[in-house]
Amino acid sequence: MKRLTRILFVSLCALALTACSASAQNVKTYGFKVEEALPHDVASYTQGLFFYDGQLYESAGQYGESSFRKVDPATGRVLKRLNFEGRYFAEGSCVLNEKLYVLTWQEKECFVYDMKTWNKLGTLRYLGEGWGLTTDGKSLIMSDGTSTITFRNPDNFAVERSITVTLRGQNVLYLNELEYIKGEIWANVYGTDQIVRIDPATGVVRAVVNLRGILPAQLRKPRTDVLNGIAFDPRTGSVYVTGKYWPKLYRITLVEKKS
């Protein structure tokens, strides 16, 4: 299930403007180099993507299809899978203090599991929608499809603080999947081929990463959806990206563009 076409159109327009203005405000802009193209489950509507203890994990959405997976990045094979009830649309996910947290889109529930056993520990509730989830090692960091990112207590999901993400003074809307990388929050912007790198203290965008064209046209099918999914492997320093129903997972390095 795709979100409203109107959202896609507006977000495309918004990011087109931010990309053009980035260099004018001393925000760094990056292209990419594909270091490795790996298989990815084309049936996965990717919502969350992260490494934990050297292993790749992924949460996938859609009503009736939502799941959490342990994935072999070399082959794309699902090594272990947790399916959710059909009434839930799974979204972003992350691990903090050996607990797995998985958001739901409109159900206002965050599921909590023991990461070692995948036994369910409970459910945390919140207002609004759930989109992306990551952690700085202390708080859970959540997006809800707006320009707001909230920092939440991992025990009760209470909001500790929030930031508004801006680029050249303008709010950046439709923040989606999140990853915390070396002191920055990286966020997919829904409906675009761009990632914004955010100062977690102020919400100011420090850099824009343009991944336009990373998935070749010949690999796109009618079901192929948008770029979504950022994973950082702290052991190697590698960044991986993919998309919803994409056949590939890409290990990339960034290439800074000079103004």
Image: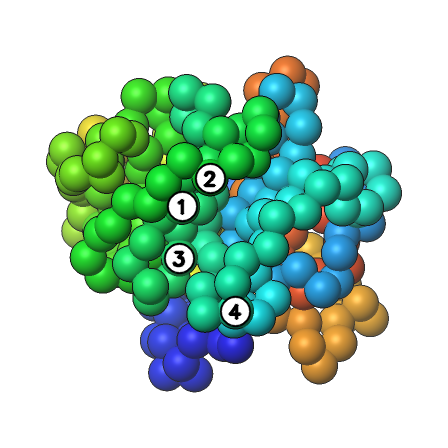
Question: Is any part of residue 232 visible from this angle?
Answer: no
Pointers 1 and 4 in contact (C-beta within 8 Å): no
Pointers 1 and 3 in contact (C-beta within 8 Å): yes
The Cα–Cα distance between marks 3 and 4, rounded to whole angstroms, is 12 Å
Q: Which residue is mark 2?
A: 120
For label 4, the SS is: loop
In front: mark 1 or mark 2? 2
Residue type at mark 1? Phe
The Cα–Cα distance between marks 1 and 2, rounded to whole angstroms, is 7 Å
Label whose residue precedes the other's in the sequence (4 or 2): 4
171 horizontally vs 19: left or right: left
For label 1, the SS is: strand
Q: Which residue is mark 4?
A: 86
83 horizontally vs 202: left or right: right
Q: Which residue is mark 3?
A: 104
Q: Tally the marks.
A: 4
Q: Who is closer to the viewer here, 70 or 111?
A: 111
Question: Is residue 52 shown above or below 27?
Answer: above
Q: Residue at x 18, y 47 (%)?
A: 164
Question: Is residue 80 shown above or below 14?
Answer: above
Task: Provide residue 221's location: percent of width, then percent of height.
Answer: 75, 76
Residue type at mark 2? Lys
Label whose residue precedes the other's in the sequence (1 or 2): 1
Task: Provide residue 53's location: percent of width, then percent of height.
Answer: 61, 20
Residue type at mark 4? Gly
Q: Which residue is mark 1?
A: 111
Label whose residue precedes the other's in the sequence (1 or 3): 3
Label whose residue precedes the other's in the sequence (3 or 4): 4
